[in-house]
Amino acid sequence: MKNSKFIIDRLAKLIEQGMISTKDLSSELLTILKSKRDELVFRLKLTSKDEFEVLLKRVEILEKKIDKIKSKKKTESKRVKRS
């Protein structure tokens, strides 16, 4: 409730200041939400963006290896002749 009240208060201030353009309003709303997201990430002590990108690359490499193993296993199973 506290966070939603914060966002509503910020939007009310923007409307009072005369920001009527939807483009300005949407960009300001995104800025508010990004700052709240960053604050939450900082409080939860999550990984940084650099660490996340490194982990993402490692996962992609592992997924490629798994796909290669699966395709190799399929080709080997097709080679087996049944009598």
Image: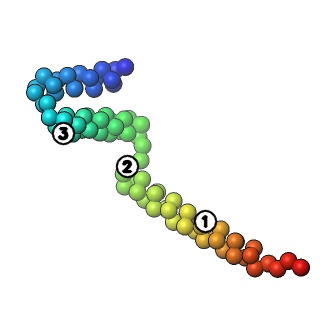
At x 30%, y 20%, the residue is 5
Q: Hey, what amino acid is under mark 2?
A: Ser
Q: Is residue 51 left or right of residue 69?
A: left
Residue 66 image label: 1
Q: Is residue 70 above or below residue 17?
A: below
Label 2 vs label 3, nearer the camera: 3
Q: Quadrant of residue 8?
A: top left
At mark 3, the secondary structure is: helix
Q: Nearer the viewer, residue 79 or 60?
A: 79
Q: Is residue 55 left or right of residue 78?
A: left
Q: Is residue 75 left or right of residue 23?
A: right
Residue that numbered label 2 is attached to: 48
Label 3 vs label 1, nearer the camera: 3
Residue 2: image x %, image y %? 34, 20
Distance from the alpha carbon under mark 1 to that under mark 2: 27 Å
Distance from the alpha carbon under mark 3 to that under mark 1: 45 Å
Label 3 crowd (10 A; few <14 / some 14-19 / many >=20) = few
Is tag 3's residue or tag 1's residue first in the polypeptide sequence? 3
Residue that numbered label 3 is attached to: 23
| Screen quadrant of the C terminus | bottom right
Using the rendered image of the protein, determine whether residue 78 is visible from the camera's viewpoint: yes
Distance from the alpha carbon under mark 2 to that under mark 3: 30 Å
Residue 19: image x %, image y %? 13, 31
Label 1 vs label 2, nearer the camera: 1
